[in-house]
Every structure is written in structure tokens, then in C-alpha cells.
Image (tube, rainbow, N blue to C red):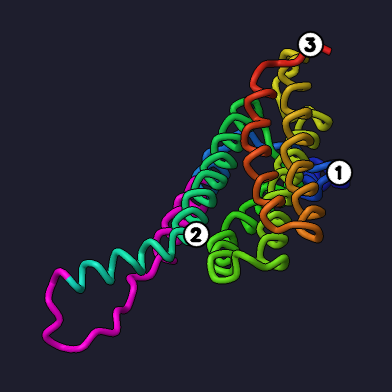
Amino acid sequence: MYEDERAGSKPPAPSTSFQGREPPGTDLSRIISLSDGVFAFALTLLALSLAVPALSLPGGTPNSAVSGKLASVLQGDWTIFVGYVFAFVMIALWWVNHHRTFRFIERYDTVLIWLNLILLMQIAVMPFVLSVYTHYDDTQTAVGLFSAIQASCGFTLGGIWWYATHTHLTDPKLDPRIVRYFRRRGAIVPLFFVAALGVTFISVSGAELVWIAAIVSQRFTARYGTS
């Protein structure tokens, strides 16, 4: 009797709790799709931040006078267009670097997801930072804020690469030169913007020149290091 009861008893249900670290996933499509969407939305918002000039002219003003006034106003707003171009280029560069980074990442975990979301949060707020800069481009606060967000994006993207390589989320056979290249690039470029943030306390125009140097510096990190 007891043997029959034991034979007919149900086996215990398997435990559904995770033991130790959560196993990494391999389908990066949702992470990539969300990232591309945020980058594209941020680039679109940059264009929406450009406002059509409002001209205060009396009725019956000849078209030639309106055209001349419009040209004068647009010329006076040249810093707005320069800021737009620079912000567009920076977001585009972060997208390119993000794309290159995730080419070598084959798996993900919760930490990597949140690191990527932190980067996207900074990309999404960049149109607002641009608006502050275009309205107050000659102030230390606006230039410093723009420098700070670029430095933060660079360090976050570098942190994504550092975490992925140290937790074996990349291809185990990945060339060590590629690993060193991304680590170097992830440190050098944001350091330029940190320097620009410091320069704002001395010269706003000088800090903007450091921005250009930051972009140029990527050219010197384009080749894989061997040291």
C-alpha cells in the first residue's frame, strides 16, 4: 500500500528561482532597435528646435525689404545654426560609436541594459542642452553644460564596453587590439570635453575650440592600438 502511494506521488515541482547571476541573453535586436529609435528621435528634435524668425515689419513692406531683413536676421542667428550642426554631428558620432561597440557585443544582461538606457537618457536630453546653448552661447553655464553632457556620453559608452569585455559578453576570440582600441577611444574623447568644461572658467570661446579638438582626436584613435 505504501509502495503504491509512493509510486503514484507526483515529483516535486522544479524551482524557478535563479541561483547566482542571471544567465545572459543573446537576442540584442530589442536593445539595438530602441537605441536607434532614441538616436533618430534626438536628431529630429534638433531640427525642431530651429525657429523661423519673426519679422516686425509694417504692412505693405516691399518683398525686397522683407528679404533683406530676413537675411539680416538669419545672419545674426548664425551661432544657432553652428550649434545645431555641432550637436547633430556629436549625436551622429555617438550613434556611430554605439553601432561599432555593439558589433562586438554578442550577449547582454540586466546591467548592460541599464548602462545602455543611461546612455540613451543622455542622448534624449541633448536637444534641450542644445536649446540652452543656442540661447546663451556666450555664457559659461551653457557651454559648460554642453561639454558635460558630451563627456558623460563618452564615459558611459566607454563603461558599456568595459563592462561587456570584463563580463565576457563579447566574443571570447575578439582581437585584443580591438579591445584596447575601444578602451582608449572611450577615455580620450570624453577627456577632451572634461578639459573643455575646465576651460569654460577661463574662456568660453576657448572651450568651444576644445570641442573641435575632441572631434579631431577621434581621427588619431581610428587605428587599432598594439600597445
Give the CA separation, mark 2 to mark 1: 56 Å
Q: Residues in magenta?
A: 36-64
Q: Nearer the viewer, residue 143 or 203?
A: 203
48 left or right of 150 in image? left
For the point 49% across and 59% down, which residue is it?
A: 79
Q: Residue at label 1?
A: 19
On whether residue 120 falls in the magenta region, the answer is: no
Counting from the top left corner in percent of width and height, residue 103 is at: 59, 27
- Distance from the alpha carbon under mark 3 to that under mark 1: 39 Å
Q: Amino acid at mark 3?
A: Thr
- Identify the disc placed on residue 79: 2
Mark number for residue 226? 3
- SS label for mark 2: helix
Q: Can see residue 101? A: yes
Magenta-drawn stretch contains 53: yes
Q: Are marks 2 and 1 in contact (CB under 8 Å)?
A: no
Q: For residue 62, which quarter of the picture?
A: bottom left
CB atoms of marks 2 and 3 within 8 Å: no
Name the element at disc 1. loop
Instruction: List x then y, in percent, for residue 225.
Output: 75, 15
Residue at (65, 30) in percent of width and height = 218
Tell which of 178 and 224 is nearer to you.
Answer: 224
Foreground of the two, 96 or 190: 190
Whichever of labels 2 and 1 marks the residue nearer the N terminus, that label is 1
Residue 158: quadrant of the picture: top right
Task: Give the amino acid type for the residue marked by disc 2 in the picture.
Answer: Thr
For residue 123, side relative to residue 152 (left or right) = left
